[in-house]
Amino acid sequence: MRKLGNLMFGALLGGLVGGTLALLFAPASGEQTRENIQVYFENLKEEINRAADEKRTELENQLKALRSGESVKLEGK
């Protein structure tokens, strides 16, 4: 039981020290960092949506071709 207590204390102390050091040596303010993170995830979301739209269009075209009886070449095969 004592080992578990020491482990928990060490983890808590390490988290506090690490968090403090991260705040002290951060290259940008908290507000700027939050803005950078928000912009990054907005760009990521747009990229994912664009890729999904492209794939959806490709699959719809393949489905139309299959329904009309044409042969469809699959990518990577």
Image: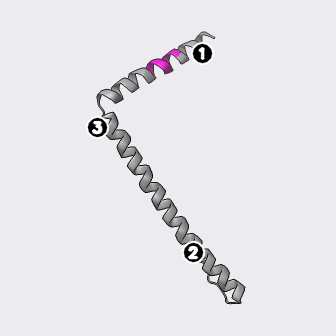
**Residue extent of the magenta highlight:** 9-14
Q: Return the x and y of residue 5 as percentages of the image width and height.
A: 57, 13
Q: Is residue 43 magenta?
A: no
Residue at 40% across / 44% down in the picture? 37
Q: Return the x and y of residue 56 as percentages of the image width and height.
A: 59, 71
Asked whether residue 34 appears in the rendered view, the answer is yes
Label 1 near label 2: C-beta < 8 Å?
no
Q: Quadrant of the C terminus?
A: bottom right
Q: Residues within 10 Å of mark 2 (few under 14, many from 20)?
A: few
Question: Callout 3, which amino acid?
Answer: Ala
Residue at 64% across / 84% down in the picture? 72
The image's mark for residue 57 is 2
Sooner in the amino-acid sequence: mark 2 or mark 1: 1
How far apart are the two marked residues, 2 and 1, measured between alpha carbons? 55 Å
From the image, tell me which residue sits under label 1.
4
Residue at 62% across / 76% down in the picture? 60
Question: Callout 2, which amino acid?
Answer: Thr
Tell me the chief SS of the magenta region.
helix
- Select label 2 or label 1 by which is in front: 2
The image's mark for residue 28 is 3
Q: Is residue 22 above or below residue 48?
A: above
